[in-house]
Image: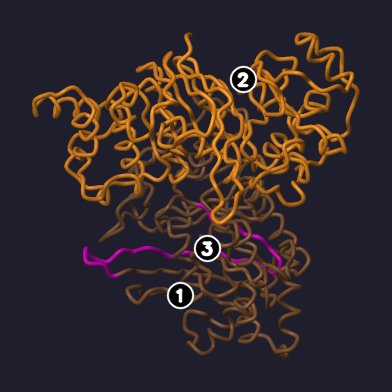
Chain colours: A brown, B orange
Amino acid sequence: MVAGSVPLLSVEDLSVEFRTRDGVVRALERVGFSIGRGETVGIVGESGSGKSVTAFTVLGLLPPAARVTSGRAVFGGLDLLTASPGQLLEYRGRELSMIFQSPRTALNPIRPVGRQIADVLERHANIPRAKRRDRVLELLARVQIPDPERRYHAYPFELSGGMCQRVMIALAVACSPALLIADEPTTGLDVTTQAGILDLLGDLSRTAGMATIMISHDLAVVAERCDRIVVMHAGHVVEQAPARALFARPRHPYTARLIASTPRAGAKLADLAPIPGAVPDLRGETTPCRYRTRCERAVSVCDEPPLPRDETAPGHVVACRRPL
Amino acid sequence: MSRLLDVRALTKRFPVRGSARWVHAVDDVSFTIERGESVGLVGESGCGKSTLVRLVTRLLEPTDGRIVFAGRDVGVIPPARFTHAPERRLIQMVFQDPADSLNPRFTAFDTIAEPLRRLGTPAPRAAVAGHVDELADLVGLPRELLGRFPHQLSGGQQQRVGIARAIALRPSLLVLDEPTSALDVSVQAMILHLLADLRERLGMSYLFVSHDLNVVRLLTDRVLVMYLGRIVESGRSEDVFDRPAHPYTRALMSAVPALETGTRRARIPLVGEPQSPIDPAPTVCRFHGRCPDGVERCTREMPVLRAGPAADHLAACHFGFAVGAPAQGSSTISPLASAVERPVARTAARRSGGQCAENSHGHPAGG
């Protein structure tokens, strides 16, 4: 993001709670990050770190048990968290779009994929009925689906996982959104297919100036494809930095651990260090630093609120009292 | 090391309903696993990995070929009867998704005790309980969790239960089908260390199936690369990973995302659509059509596995070891270097461009 310019999406101080039978779960606590036009930002963390909840909150797709207790998510001058359902409907699908983790379950199983894309155009784009089909074929070709004419009538079960994900992408970018949120877009796909899908997302964001939030548990995927990376742990943003800086010099102990636990080419098993402990229970009261119990650098000052947010270098923010 | 598993020319075809055609799921596959050895099996979904695993674990009837386990041909035993074969307890499996592969109505204790009760030597209740405790210790599962049901356990704990169940009968061969792909990296690291440790302690052989090449490399001595039902490359892990010879292997390696930003390898994209596994032409290389190096010869002559300069390194490509070998290598075909000395006869056959008369296992080619 260019300093001084207005970001495309700015999430500030976002806290979300879930009411459950076992008490209130503080799923997000004071989460903040922003994304500029055309930028690709990765959000990484273990399962349960709040990556998907963040995306769902921004899109207004939280279940009824969830409650936003604080914060703003400003997109194009509009706070998405206080927007009316009608306003959100106008934004979602047109300006803001999302692709989901398992394309096969996210697509309608009993409607041909071409028709599903046409539905989006009917709802959100001003394209006459007669032209819609051509536009769908164009979109299918753009996401590199071979033989779009034939695939227009295919049902999701007739397509491979990679093809279904391409259809999802076509659906999401049908109205040229300004921001695409991709939640684990390649989890469960083969590495060769994964590379193809990620290339496609990269091309789309470059050619259309589309900003992308890429949510992944795979550090290597975001390392390669993102300009900036936000690391989440147990509902906190623990570190955010430009991709290169984050991997060159991680400051938060959790980030360093996450990097050390990712298998890399040419590494030995002995180099692979697991992260001790587990994501803490987020029910009830939590400690100021939620990594405290897993951290080998923790000292008594770590128990004192509030959680710091120190900018150690331009754009490099770390939430730790004793950064590396 | 002595030989534990010897798979010879194994073939499995499934009929296509409503036609006389066949899906060639596994086609003329041969490989071996030594005692105590860990062998990786990689390839994209639909390449026949799972079918091969199900043949080896004797859940499927092979169409043709032999599966010799510990000196006995177990391929001839019908799957329904294999339950009673003495080899049944020696071949065990760890599944991909621990949440799906554990019985939701069984406690961790029951799950681990089940193979002991079904296939173990009859023992009093207390002995079984003692054995389960031992297994829990072995896989690092706290004993107080044994009374819990799968939904009360974390993903890593669930997979420890799955591993404890699989090693309960002290198998000689453990088949691991993507054992960590459903886990977080932090947990994956723990499970990988556990698996390496167990292999050393119990002297098991592993057949490790995964599409995560970085993980396969960590845990295997040798690796098999499968494409559309056939093994296209095999060899010691360091040879295959550092000097991949088959264009498919090279494309696969180049697609693995690298953690180091800015050091990305030039990616070899796979263009075109894969061939159909239904009655593929026997004379056409299976990879033709997606191969960046494909020439006319690849449509006339199915390449068979041939040896390269390193011991045990085989690739089924007419140009395998001739092309600039490293992963970053260009796709230009350079003349075969004289470094390839070892398999003299085969090298000569390839140089002259003639039909290679045998594959690596001495079977007639083109089967």
| B356 left or right of A95 in image | right
Residue A104, numbered label:
3
> Residues under labels 1 and 2: Cα distance?
49 Å
Amino acid marked by disc 2? Arg
x, y percentage for residue B22?
Answer: 60, 45
Secondary structure of residue under mark 3 = helix
Subunit of label 2: B
Q: Is residue A27 magenta?
A: yes
Q: In this picture, is B43 found above or below B314?
A: below
* Same chain for the residues under marks 1 and 2 in the image: no
Is B255 positioned to the left or the right of B155 in the image? right
Q: Residues within 10 Å of mark 1 (few under 14, many from 20)?
A: few
For the residue pair B48 and A11, the one nearer the viewer reads as B48
**Quadrant in which the N terminus of chain A is drawn:** bottom right
State the separation of the CA atoms marked 3 and 1. Answer: 19 Å
Q: Secondary structure at mark 2?
A: strand
Amino acid at pointer 3 = Arg
Measuring 63% from the left and 34% from the top, which residue is drawn there?
B230
Asked if residue A119 is positioned above or below residue B186 in the image, the reply reads below
Bounds of the magenta span? A19-44
Query: How many angstroms separate mark 3 from mark 2 (CA)?
Result: 37 Å
In the picture of the structure, the residue carrying the numbered disc 1 is: A61
Label 1 vs label 2, nearer the camera: 2
Q: Which residue is mark 2?
A: B236
Amino acid type indicated by mark 1: Leu
Classify mark 1: helix, strand or loop: loop
Which residue is most to the front? Answer: B20
